[in-house]
Amino acid sequence: MLRTSVDVYGLTLYCYVSNDNVESPTLRVKPGDEIVLILRNDLPPADAVPGHHHTSTKACTGGAGKMTASSTNLHFHGLGIPPTCHQDEVLHTAVQPGDPAFEYRIEIPPNQPPGLYWYHPHPHGFSERQVLGGASGAMIVEGIEQGLTERVLILRDQRIGGVAEDADSSEDDRPSIPTLDLSLNYVPIMFPLYKPAVMLVRPNQREFWRVLNASADTFFDLQLLYWPDKNTQIEQSVEVVAVDGVPVGKDYASVARKSVLLPPGSRVEFVMTTPPAGMYAQLLTKRYENGPVGNTDSYRVLANIRSLSDAPSVKETTPPSSAKGQPFSGLTSLPVARARTLYFSETPAHPKQNVSYFLTAGDAKPKVFDMNATKPDLTAVQGTLEDWTIENRTQESHVFHIHQLHFQLIEKDGVRMNESALRDTIELPFWDGKSTTYPRIKLRMDFRNPNIVGTFLYHCHILEHEDGGMMGSIEVIPAPNPSH
């Protein structure tokens, strides 16, 4: 069930609670499993908001025609499952307070890449509010376990206590204040004290960490810092195993990385080595530059790591897996059916209040996403690949995400990229306002999965922007039958 409360700082919190009172449980599944989730909306009723309702006859729930701040649904981020009612469908599904419990019944595809996924609410216009409040949870498709101690780390953001929910803490006169507070596994790391969580580890152990950026709006540039002595600082490297739920190829995994950037919605799984006994160590996020009109994502320590010989053992110790590498290799060598150009834009560029956000395809006129549109913004054919060039024409960073499928980064700012990682979420740095070219990426989109026939969404995964209209819809139609 989805519940809400108000904390001592006046912040509205949201949380999924299972029948046995576990908050936002981590769901562990295997390829081929069927999952039945019963969602009950225990939020207090709220008034309908103009512009965020759906009048379509395709409504999946009885209350889908009236979108309110208390409407909710579930999106299973990263899974290649059908965009249909009672599965991963958010356009026509709105569970209201007082509605009968709503059943989600999904089958994890037998070929679903093993790794870290997540679930969160996706009611258009109110996604940010519910995710900022804490409504999110991890989902693990088993199959790349390393035979090591496993830690599932969930990063979230929330409004700063004592600041009005419609206030903008990134205004020019408050440059030292972050836009949002953070938490690690619900341990708050709050302005201005920034008291980090404490992580107890055993010395010199290889561990398997699964890290989810379940924030609404915050970038995390993760780094492990070790201090052999008070005058020496080491940037500890990690071995990335998977990105956005998909095991990476050997070329990607073989690179030792001293930092990992996670835009909102993305995930990383890596192997690290804990520090020797008594060594001071920290997990932190470096400052991320969002641009002159973007959020302020400050440097913050997320956890102090204490390496003790008698540290308690972690329950999540996984057996080794026989799973092998990335299942979708070779995308770069396959023929492409068509190429498209999309771009992020917004107006006005400044001030930040009352901004309209757009994600526009081709030469169409920029518009905020319309829940009542009768036609999708794009149409693709199942079984094909497409190349999408995406530009950022704004002075703040954005995050491209598409439901139902993964893509491969082909080019960045015109430079060919040779990396095997597949993603469902990727960042676009801000435009400096002067250059004659915009920051851009080229992505190879994989529409071959027959499960994804139907209509679903692509959008900026900074949820303030998504709620503000920076979203589009795409219909994947069945491939023509060659016998007809």
Image (cartoon, rainbow, N blue to C red):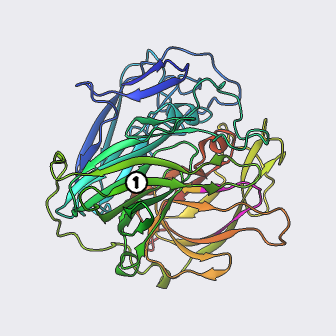
Q: Position of residue 4 (x, y in %)?
A: 45, 21
Determine whether, in the image, residue 226 is placed left or right of residue 324.
Answer: right
Question: Which quadrant would residue 427 be assigned to in this image?
Answer: bottom right
- Is residue 356 visible in this depiction of the protein? yes
Determine whether, in the image, residue 66 is placed left or right of residue 212.
Answer: right
Depth check, front residue: 121 or 383? 121
Determine whether, in the image, residue 17 is placed left or right of residue 162.
Answer: left
Query: Element type at marker 1?
Result: strand
Depth check, front residue: 34 or 271? 271
| Residue at x 22%, y 59% (from the top left corner) | 203
Question: Which quadrant would residue 250 be assigned to in this image?
Answer: bottom left
Which residues, given as a range, are shown in magenta? Answer: 389-399
| Residue at x 24%, y 46% (from the top left corner) | 34
Tell me, yes or no, whether the highlighted magenta stretch contains residue 269. no
Residue identified by numbered label 1: 282
Q: Position of residue 316 (x, y in %)?
A: 19, 49
Depth check, front residue: 235 or 13? 235
Q: Position of residue 91 (x, y in %)?
A: 55, 39
Relative to residue 318, is residue 28 depicted above or below?
above
Neighbourhood count class around disc 1 (C-alpha, 10 Å): few under 14, some 14–19, many 20 upward: many
Question: Amino acid type of disc 1?
Answer: Gln
